[in-house]
Every structure is written in structure tokens, then in C-alpha cells.
Image (spheres, rainbow, N blue to C red):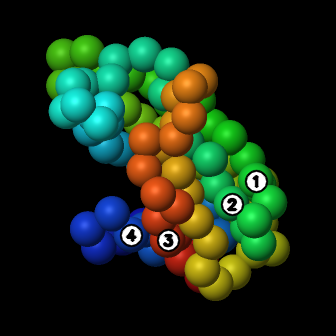
Amino acid sequence: MIEYIYDTIKATAGEDIPIIMEVRDPEGNLVTEGCGISIHCDDEQVCRIEGTYNESEQIWKFVIPGEATKGHSGRHYYCVCKADGTLNFKTPIYLV
């Protein structure tokens, strides 16, 4: 199960979590390469997932493997990032 409430995500821990989004830099330009997503738990990075860009749809797909969230529950955070830093503040992801 996965639900989006604006940019907050609710998902089932221990299952693969597909996240699909359009990613833009601070200037509003589409980011088309080198993008990843990091999941944080108690200020520790749980995992970083490299995304796949679909040029025809201009969207990124990230799949957080179930093994990375297995045994976790409650509120954690995710950030969309590039090699030169994050593109957003830590945003909630709730694992149930």
C-alpha cells in the first residue's frame, strides 16, 4: 500500500515502495539525471536509492526495496538528492 498526501507518503514497511515524481531544481528546471532518494530514520540514512528517469513522461521512478524498510514503523523522512546536495527538506514518510 502507498498513499500520497501532497508530498507526504504513507506506505507498508517490508514491501517494495514505488515513488513516482517530477523533480525540479531550485530554479524550476527539470532534473533529468543523477537523482536519488534517501530514507532517514532517527537522523541515520537508512538507504539511498538511485532513480530511473523516463524522458517521454519527464518523471522519476524510485523503488525503495522492502528489505530496507523491514522492521521499521512510524514517521521517518525522505529527501530527493543529487550529487551536489538535497533538493528538498526532509519530508515525512510513514511506515505501517
Residue type at tag 3: Pro
Element type where label 3 sits in the image: strand
Q: Position of residue 70 (x, y in %)?
A: 77, 66
Q: Looking at the picture, tell me which residue is in the foreground, 96 or 77.
A: 77
Q: Which of the 4 image quarters holds residue 4?
A: bottom left
Instruction: Work out which quarter of the rendered image holds the C terminus and state it.
Output: bottom right
Cα distance in 3D space between marks 4 and 1: 18 Å
Q: Say which label, 2 or 3, has the lower sequence index.
A: 2
Q: Position of residue 92 (x, y in %)?
A: 49, 71
Q: Which of the 4 image quarters holds residue 36?
A: top right
Q: Say which label, 2 or 4, has the lower sequence index.
A: 4
Q: Position of residue 82 (x, y in %)?
A: 53, 28
Residue type at tag 1: Gln
Q: In this view, which residue lies farthest toward the front? A: 27
Residue at (64%, 84%) from the top-left corner? 74
Q: Say which label, 4 or 3, has the lower sequence index.
A: 4
The residue where tag 4 is placed is 8
Position of 96 relative to 58 (above/below): below
Q: Say which label, 3 or 1, has the lower sequence index.
A: 1
Cα distance in 3D space between marks 2 and 3: 9 Å
The residue where tag 2 is placed is 40
The residue where tag 1 is placed is 45
